Amino acid sequence: MRILITGIGSDIAQATARVIRDEFPNAVIIGADIHNMHAGHFFCDEMLLSCRADSVNFIGWLKETIVTKKIDIYIPLSEAELRALSVLGELPGVVSDAIIWAGNFCATKCLDKLKTFQFLELNGVHIPWTKEPSHLSEIKFPCIFKTINEITCPVYLDKDNVVHVLQLQRKLSGGLTGWCKTVNYEEVRELCKKVVHLLKPECPINIQLILTDQGPRIFEINPRISSTALIRDKMGFQDVRWMINAKIGKPQTIDSNVELGIIGYKLTDAEICHEK
């Protein structure tokens, strides 16, 4: 099996690659990014330079890469790339056959945060009031800019239409999850299940929210795998493995029940190499 992971310079792609390597040790992982000044090559068998997603040449590059590198599975993990794919409407055949992503509908609704809130409100989901930046003078308190102590929920819709939800209380460090703990709030679980059934994502996505006196309030939905992929895999919520096994038609029994109170940490590591 040959797997293309784009945006390999990101922590999300590298975490995903590590999980894939553990689940499929014989797979060939090909990473791609728009530059090579990152550690992505430590996580793949071959490293490619890709076109920028906003380039007119991107889709041509992608189709050629999938064909020439004999890619079986293609996992796009940069938001710029997801935007470029979502505006196409219908994906080219070779891309459509290989891709694992949330799907056009989910991506379109979630990549634009204002559209996300409009969609949720239209479907009866209570949301924080939301303004465009041009209307900042109308801000009234309380409001959410972005909290550093939040609940992040990786969710996965399986082929039997069952929604699997993991709830992680987390603290950010440098904009990324530095610490997290498994928790369980029934209101959060039911809200996530409702939103997933509305969006019908075709891969794991991530719902971010906070708890308020009026109940949980979503402030962001990321239509892709999130940066806690490796942490939650170690906890037992193995959505990266599930999505690939589903793609290749491998029979599996999904157990998403994770013990409460498990704590995950993001560690820092370093590698060096000599310039070739």
Image (tube, helix red, strand yellow):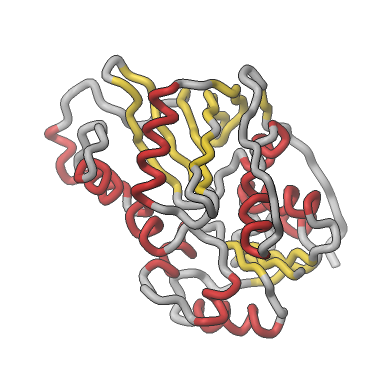
Q: Does residue 273 appear left or right of residue 101 in this picture?
A: right
Q: Does residue 149 appear left or right of residue 114 in this picture?
A: right
Residue 211 to residue 229: above or below: above
Q: Does residue 276 appear left or right of residue 163 in this picture?
A: right
Residue 60 to residue 260: above or below: below
- Residue shown at the point (39%, 31%) measured from the top left: 190
Q: Residue 183 sits in which quadrant?
A: top right
- Residue shown at the point (56%, 62%) measured from the top left: 100
Residue furthest top as drawn: 213
Is residue 175 visible to us here? no
Where residue 171 appears, x then y in whole percent?
54, 24
Where residue 140 appears, x then y in whole percent?
16, 25
- Residue shown at the point (70%, 55%) measured from the top left: 251
Residue situated in front as seen by the camera: 244 or 116: 244
Residue situated in front as seen by the camera: 32 or 264: 264
Residue 15 to residue 171: above or below: below
Q: Quadrant of the N terminus?
A: bottom right
Q: Residue 84 sits in which quadrant?
A: bottom left
Residue situated in front as seen by the camera: 58 or 193: 193
Residue furthest left as drawn: 138
**Count of marks overlaid on the render:** 0
Where residue 96 appears, x then y in whole percent?
52, 74
Q: Quadrant of the C terminus?
A: bottom right
- Residue shown at the point (73%, 48%) measured from the top left: 19
Is residue 123 visible to us here? yes
Where residue 208 appears, x then y in whole percent?
43, 35
Residue situated in front as seen by the camera: 199 or 257: 257
